[in-house]
Amino acid sequence: MGFLYPGALTAFALVPLLVVAYLVRERPRRVIVSSVISFYALRTLRAQRPWGWPRLDWRFVVELLILSLVVLAMAGPYQIRPRTPIAVVLDNSAAMQVREPDGVRFAQARQRLLRELPEQADLEVALYLTAPAPHLLASGLDSVQARGLISAAHPLDAPDDGAATARLLADLATSHRFSSILVASTHPFLPPVPAIFHLITVGTALPNYALGSFTVTAQSFGASALKARLSLANFSSQARTVRVDLYGDDKPLAHAQPQLAAREVSTLEFPSVSRAIAYRAQLLPTDAFSLDNVAYASAATGDVVRLLFVSPTPHDAQGLSELPGLEVTTMTPEQYSPDRVGADLIVFEYAVPKELPGANALLVMPPADDPIFGLQLARAATTQVTSWRSPDPLTDNVNFRLLQMRQAQSFKTGSWLDTVVESNAGALILDGSHQGHRYVVMGFNPFPYLGSRNLPMSILTLNVLAYLSGFGSSEVGYRTGRPWVVPSGITQIVTPRGVRYQVKPGQLFSGDNSQGFYKMSGPGGQQRLRAVNLDDLTVSDLEDRQPLKLELAPAPPAPPSTFAQRRSLTAYLLAAILLLAAGEALLIYRRPAMARTV
């Protein structure tokens, strides 16, 4: 035991002053009088003089103890106790779900980790997990607490970041905060490995067949036929014929039996599949890693696109409702509210929102000088298209020389939007992205949609809607371990494991990082699914496990063999002071009434 501020102990000189205060205090006598006034007037009684033998009661002892404790608290007492701090790093990534001949990898790692974790009383454990990113789960654990958390841990469907895990291990080794570091992982380590590490490596090289990305999309925007596309791999040393079954709403839709060469990664397409809400692809035969034998696709890529048309002339949206896979809702600008939006994309015709909408949006001939997009009109007697950006998804296959614009307005450049099509007066079509959403501004009106009766304008309209709805995007789907933006109008999400989350539109969400369908719902009764897959063929390659290399400084100094922790006792002293003071006050308050003393 020691003191942080030993000089404060000189305050014990105040203790004799408390004794003197009790000695010089007038000790009254109990006298029964008919009136206090007459007592003071006659002054027939004199108080007993001070000094003499002290009459120390229980209050003196309590106050003496309180004063002593205050002095000790000022000195900052502490207790030194030995400790053995260790770090435990447990791999909980998707690869730990592989079933080995002796059991699941994660169960093997957990069992060996519990067996090799010390049980000494001075143990202090910091527990780290590796997926979806390396992070500290808990620190300051004793042996019992650490065993409880390790036993309750389970692997995620998300891959880990090997480079980030290696950096974490290097930081733990060079921090000199731990006497040893226990690592349980499926990754092998490249030598040299410092002596501070105790490695538990589980898993062997196994052949594996895997599904990667899975998407269900239309041949073109507005087309009724859907196309399913999958990537699959044969991570083995022999050629193999596999079977892929495709289901829509749990009903068989199609199947194929492609032959894959050794170590081949291929693509499989189903050119025409029926529309459904939920799609599932199943790979046969099953193998040791069941997580990559199934993949999911949802309405986000294969079903209805919800479009909200906000305009003072809602009848301009009539032609859009004829497009397959497009669900159109109309309202006037006065009816529009960001809280009521439950659409995949929004069209503002002759209007502009007061704030950036929480969905991809198209602005058609918006008013100028708005504070959100910063658009300024450029005046000209006539408007003619002079140039356009190519290649670009908005201008693909559009013959601008045949484009018929009833009326048009151009915009001055200088806002955060980029020019896609330019006229003799300024920008005619602009696009940009902000906070994960896409925005397109058009200086002429492509509505109503006339189809083949105005083919150049119809192609441009389909390009814009396809771009805003995500059709043709390079993003093949949503992956475990990667957060995604909550769509507009969604307030609750239920994960494939059945866990409910209350969310807000626009926030990043990853849930419990499980593979499958996430059920999304909002206050307006809308419900939709979002498919999330492992979609990482690097994890599925069980024959070529990526080793980890620890990038450490040359010859790092060894950590100290013994650790000590200084534990402050000031908080306990303060608690004792408060309890004593409260007890004294309570006893004085509860004493029975007695004759007045003077």
Image (tube, rainbow, N blue to C red):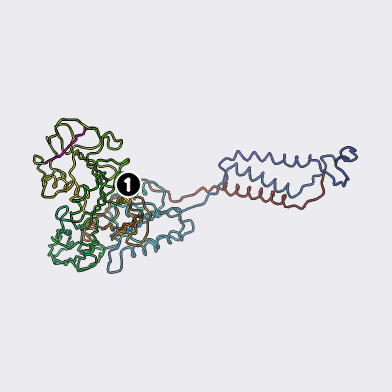
Instruction: Write down the region rendered in magenta.
Output: 404-412
Residue sitting nearer the eye, 171 or 392: 392
Indicate whether 6 appears above or below 261.
above
Measured as percent of width and height from the top left, residue 408 is found at 17, 37
Q: Which quadrant of the rendered structure holds the C terminus?
A: top right
Measured as percent of width and height from the top left, residue 554 is found at 31, 44
Question: Horizontally, is 501 left or right of 331 in the view?
Answer: right
Q: Which residue is mark 1?
A: 335
> Is residue 568 on the magenta stretch?
no
Q: How many marks are shown on the rendered structure?
A: 1
Residue 483 in sight in this render: no
Question: Horizontally, is 262 left or right of 69 in the view?
Answer: left
> Is residue 411 on the magenta stretch?
yes
Which image quarter: residue 100? bottom left
Residue sitting nearer the eye, 514 or 410: 410
**Helix, strand or loop status at disc 1:** loop
Residue 104 in sight in this render: yes
Amino acid at dot 1: Gln
Measured as percent of width and height from the top left, residue 300 is found at 24, 55
The local crowd at label 1, few if under 14, some if 14 to 19, many if 20 or more residues have their Cα within 10 Å, is few
Which image quarter: residue 264? bottom left
Residue sitting nearer the eye, 190 or 206: 206
| Magenta portion: prevailing SS class | loop
Indicate whether 249 appears above or below 563.
below
Q: At x 66% / y 48%, what residue is drawn?
A: 581
Question: Horizontally, is 121 left or right of 66 in the view?
Answer: left
Indicate whether 1 appears above or below 498.
above
Measured as percent of width and height from the top left, residue 594 is found at 80, 50
Residue sitting nearer the eye, 26 or 395: 395
